[in-house]
């Protein structure tokens, strides 16, 4: 509904427009202040979410690293035992064919240990990426909520 202006002796058209412009400037300033506060709130939420994600990733990486070290240590101990047994067998092996079969077993065991180490490193990297992605999603949600709150 359009407002109609009636010229009265108490207020001039110029005074009317100046008061309307002043009201608009006040509303614009209030909107700007609300948006500024929303952005500041969103940034604080983002920083909190990122700190939480990084802390969780650090804890998880420490846990994975510990598990990796333990797995590698156990694999090395098992490999050492196998090598000791292999050395005992080598002393008792008389034929060349038996030596080649034992060397193939040693090579296979080395490949298994290497594979275990590589898998453990891959799992750690995957979890770190997932934690980072989770922090990003939380940040986006925080910004969206802050903008929504500021606009209503």
Image (cartoon, rainbow, N blue to C red):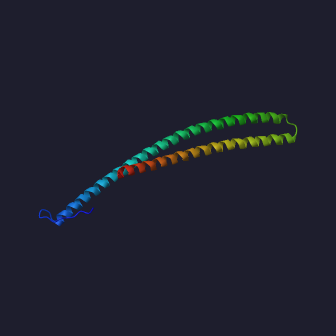
Image-based side of 94 in relation to 72, left or right: right
Please provide percent x and percent y for residue 115. 68, 44
Which part of the image, by quadrant, shows the N terminus?
bottom left
Image-based side of 94 in relation to 59, left or right: right
Image-based side of 78 in relation to 120, left or right: right
Question: Viewer-proximal residue, 108 or 42?
Answer: 42
Question: Viewer-proximal residue, 51 or 14?
Answer: 14
Q: Report the residue at 39% width, 51% height from top.
A: 148
Q: Report the residue at 67% width, 34% height from top.
A: 74
Please provide percent x and percent y for residue 151. 36, 52
What residue occupies the far front of the structure in this picture?
Answer: 1
Q: Report the residue at 41% width, 48% height from top.
A: 145
Please provide percent x and percent y for residue 49. 45, 45
Q: Report the residue at 81% width, 34% height from top.
A: 89
Number of numbered discs visible in the structure rendering = 0
Q: In this view, does 94 lie above or below 4?
A: above
What residue occupies the far right of the structure in this picture?
Answer: 95
Please provide percent x and percent y for residue 4. 22, 64
Question: Viewer-proximal residue, 1 or 131?
Answer: 1
What residue occupies the far left of the structure in this picture?
Answer: 9
Image quadrant where residue 65 sits: top right
Image-based side of 24 in relation to 64, left or right: left
Image quadrant where residue 83 sits: top right
């Amino acid at each position: 509904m359009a407002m109609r202006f009636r010229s009265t002796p108490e207020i001039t058209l110029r005074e009317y427009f100046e008061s309307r412009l002043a009201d608009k400037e006040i509303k614009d300033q209030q909107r700007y202040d609300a948006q500024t506060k929303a952005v500041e709130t969103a940034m604080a939420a983002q920083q909190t979410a990122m700190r939480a994600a990084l802390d969780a990733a650090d804890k998880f990486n420490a846990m994975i690293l510990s598990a990796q070290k333990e797995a590698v240590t156990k694999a090395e101990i098992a490999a050492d035992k196998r090598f000791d047994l292999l050395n005992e067998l080598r002393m008792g092996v008389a034929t060349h064919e038996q030596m080649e079969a034992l060397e193939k077993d040693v090579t296979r065991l080395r490949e298994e240990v290497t594979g275990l180490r590589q898998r453990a490193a891959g799992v750690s990297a995957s979890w770190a990426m997932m934690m980072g992605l989770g922090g990003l999603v939380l940040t986006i949600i925080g910004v969206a909520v802050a903008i929504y709150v500021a606009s209503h």
